[in-house]
């Protein structure tokens, strides 16, 4: 899963009929120090997340594994709202090879 | 599956029902020499790994299989803790 911050909502009336009733939130990827990254994702909310909250997003076909998103064209779902983050193993990021 | 190192833990009380009871860990993917590969991810811990431990995790919808529920929005699960790695070449 990835860490993100809810920054807004997407309203859309003309859409796939399976998506009627889905609440789309815009989630910006953030790093371990909560610094925002460029990427954002549109995720369906399954836990009642609000704008500004730090959330965890599951992506890919696992996103369909909730009662609401089952058999729907949805590949990102907010599955938790973060209370606390504890980064215990701090190391300077030597060089990160992007695969 | 990928090798990874546990670099932190997340507490979240408000979460999807089916994932309660599992710890969520921050995992830095690494290669077999221990070099960081890519960005840290969040994985559900089904084996009870501790901070700093070298583990391996499974991603995509297979990540739901270790859980004792049949449906859960999880795309990464830690499924084992490494004792040792032996590289021939």
Image: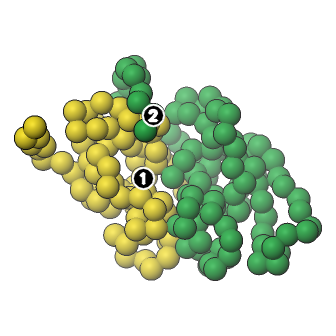
From mark 1 to mark 2, how far is it between C-alphas? 19 Å
Discs 1 and 2 carry the same chain letter: no
Name the side, left or right, on which B32 lies relative to B70.
left
Percent coordinates x, y for residue A43 in the rendering:
69, 57
Residue sitting at x 81%, y 73%: A16
Colour of the chain lettered B: yellow
The chain that hosts pointer 1 is B
Q: Residue furthest right?
A: A13
Residue B7 seen anywhere in this rendered image of the structure: no
Q: Residue furthest front?
A: B89
In contact (CB < 8 Å): disc 1 and disc 2: no
The chain that hosts pointer 2 is A
What kind of element bears circle 2?
loop
Percent coordinates x, y for residue B17 in the rendering:
54, 70
Above or below, B73 against A93 in this view is: below
User: On the image, which quarter does residue A53 sit in?
Assistant: top right
Nearer to us in this view, B56 or A5: B56
The residue wearing badge 1 is: B43
Question: Which numbered circle lies on residue A98?
Answer: 2
Quadrant position of the C terminus of chain B in the picture: top left
């Amino acid at each position: 899963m990835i860490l993100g911050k809810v920054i807004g909502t997407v309203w859309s009336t003309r859409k796939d009929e399976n998506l009627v009733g889905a609440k789309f939130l815009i989630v910006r990827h953030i790093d371990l120090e909560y610094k925002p990254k460029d990427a954002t994702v549109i995720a369906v909310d399954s836990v009642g997340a609000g704008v500004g909250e730090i959330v965890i997003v599951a992506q890919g076909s696992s996103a369909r594994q909730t009662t609401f998103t089952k058999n729907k064209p949805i590949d990102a779902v907010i599955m938790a709202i973060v209370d606390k983050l504890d980064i215990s193993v701090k190391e300077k990021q030597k060089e990160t090879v992007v695969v | 599956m990928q090798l990874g190192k546990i670099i932190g833990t997340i507490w979240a009380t408000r979460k999807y029902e089916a994932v309660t009871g599992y710890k969520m860990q921050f995992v830095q993917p690494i290669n077999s020499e221990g070099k960081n590969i890519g960005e840290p991810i969040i994985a559900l811990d089904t084996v009870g790994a501790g901070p700093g431990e070298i583990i391996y995790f499974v991603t995509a919808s297979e990540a739901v299989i270790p859980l004792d529920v049949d449906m859960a929005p999880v795309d990464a699960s830690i499924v084992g803790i490494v004792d040792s790695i032996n590289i021939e070449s």
